[in-house]
Image: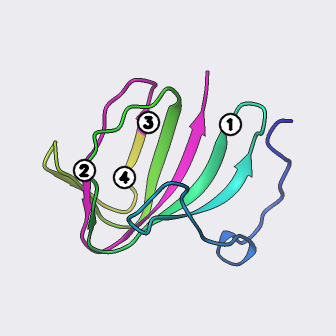
Amino acid sequence: MPKPEIEFKDYDTHYEWRPVEGDTLGIKEKILSYDEDTGDYTRMLKFPPGIETTETLIHDFWEEVLIVEGTLYDKAKKETYLPGYYACRPPGMTHGPYKIPTGCVTFEIRYHK
């Protein structure tokens, strides 16, 4: 089943934050739409203030990320990303690890070919 048809909804009140599966840092997500057949989804991701990730990430899917609020510091690149910054990562692109000094909320779309 493809992602569902959804007319405008207030993501702040319509969807609940839930812990990201397997996460131990307190990162939460709101899944906005999900395709059960492909695993593709759109979500909001919320990082609490003061956390640091330690892993460099590599995915087998496309990932698009827009920072909505807060800041994200890329420890490898030594760059800080602010609200309005956007990334489009093809499968195999490395990214991270990150520091999140003040917290951060991102809008993220993940999809396969």
Looking at the image, residue 38 lies above or below residue 13: above
* Residue 61 x, y percent position in the rendering: 53, 29
Check if mark 4's residue and mark 3's residue have beta carbons within 8 Å. no
Disc number for residue 26: none
Of residue 69 and residue 59, the one placed in the foreground of this image is 59
Q: What is the CA distance from the residue labelled 3 to the residue labelled 2? A: 21 Å
Q: What stretch is highlighted in magenta?
A: 88-113
Residue at label 1? 39
Q: What is the CA distance from the residue labelled 1 to the residue labelled 4? A: 25 Å
* N-terminal-most mark, 3 or 2: 2
Residue at label 2? 54
Q: In which quarter of the image is residue 102?
A: bottom left
Residue at label 4? 85
* N-terminal-most mark, 2 or 4: 2
Q: In which quarter of the image is the C terminus?
A: top right
Q: What is the CA distance from the residue labelled 2 to the residue labelled 1? A: 25 Å
